[in-house]
Image (cartoon, grey):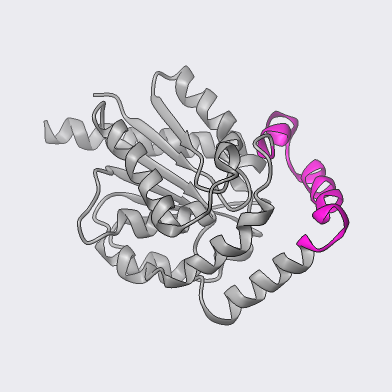
């Protein structure tokens, strides 16, 4: 059976951030689903809840699992929620997992500071989009620049989504993950703070750090990230062959 890929976006953005990955995977014959979490993209008018986000991921994974082994990839907030999902006491049908830009425990002073900065940024004229656009123009390649925000930005959802992450017990979830796991971080990613702890706790994890790259590793280095998807898919194919 052909590996199926489910992609989960980060805070504020949407499924459109994965367009380069979707095109890459489809060209190679893999089924791929990029979801919109509640309060984001095509679901902007919905309220974000952690239960709703987990249900969205679960529905996509179980639908994909009917067609083949599932590789789940989540970025930033999406990656944090996916860690909780994959590491549930009752494991979901996920054969492999890429956790991108999400090796930080979202609690305490760090989370409070991040939420405060986000609120201050959101209070700027035009909700800070003039600065956001300048940064994205300077750091993202033309092939992904328009995709990153094509689904809109979930300004009104951001604080509620960040607050909800504080209940996640990521270390307990990581200890339960028994499938191949890849942590992918940009060299200059601010969420690398707990990466060594995450790798130590997880049973079958590899850490890949992409040089000269920020938090937006999927969009800033799309070809590198696509190659990592290919690596993960090859690993799952090899495991399936060995087990047959």
| Above or below for 166 versus 46 | below
Q: Residue at x 66, y 55 (%)?
A: 156
Left or right, residue 205 beside residue 214 = left
Q: Is 143 above or below relative to 205? A: above
Q: Give the side of residue 110 with respect to residue 73, left or right.
A: right
Image coordinates of residue 129 in percent, x first then y, are: 81, 50
Which of the 4 image quadrants contains residue 198?
Answer: bottom left
In this picture, is 236 found above or below 208? above
| Percent position of residue 184, x then y | 50, 52
Residue positioned 51% across, 70% down in the render = 106
- In the picture as drawn, the residue positioned furthest to the bottom comes out as 109
* Residue 212 placement (x, y as % from top left): 68, 51
Between 140 and 85, the residue placed more toward the observer is 85
- Total marks shown come to 0
- Tell me where the magenta segment starts and ends, as one range: 122-149
- In percent of width and height, residue 37 lies at 50, 46
Please name the predominant secondary structure of the magenta segment in the image.
Answer: helix
- As for residue 143 lying within the magenta part, the answer is yes
Query: Residue at point 40% right, 68% down?
Result: 168
Q: Quadrant of the C terminus?
A: top left
């Amino acid at each position: 059976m052909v590996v199926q890929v489910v992609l989960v976006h980060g805070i504020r953005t949407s499924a459109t951030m994965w367009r380069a990955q979707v095109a890459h995977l489809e060209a190679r014959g893999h089924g791929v689903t990029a979801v919109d979490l509640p309060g984001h993209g095509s679901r902007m008018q919905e309220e974000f809840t952690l239960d709703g986000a987990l249900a969205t991921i679960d529905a996509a994974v179980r639908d994909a699992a009917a067609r083949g082994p599932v590789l789940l990839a989540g970025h930033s907030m999406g990656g944090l929620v996916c860690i909780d999902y994959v590491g549930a006491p009752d494991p979901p049908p996920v054969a492999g997992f890429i956790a991108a830009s999400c090796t930080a425990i979202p609690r305490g002073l760090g989370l409070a500071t991040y939420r405060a900065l986000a609120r201050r940024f959101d209070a700027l004229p035009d909700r800070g989009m003039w600065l956001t656009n300048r940064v994205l123009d300077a750091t993202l390649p033309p092939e992904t620049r328009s995709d990153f925000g094509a689904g809109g930005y979930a300004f009104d959802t951001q604080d509620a989504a960040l607050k909800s992450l504080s209940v996640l017990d990521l270390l307990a979830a990581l200890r339960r993950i028994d499938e191949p796991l890849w942590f992918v971080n940009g060299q200059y990613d601010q969420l690398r703070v707990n990466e060594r702890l995450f790798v130590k706790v997880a049973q079958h994890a590899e850490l890949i750090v992409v040089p000269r790259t920020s938090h937006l590793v999927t969009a800033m280095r799309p070809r590198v990230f696509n190659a990592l998807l290919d690596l993960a898919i090859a690993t799952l194919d090899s495991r399936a062959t060995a087990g047959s």
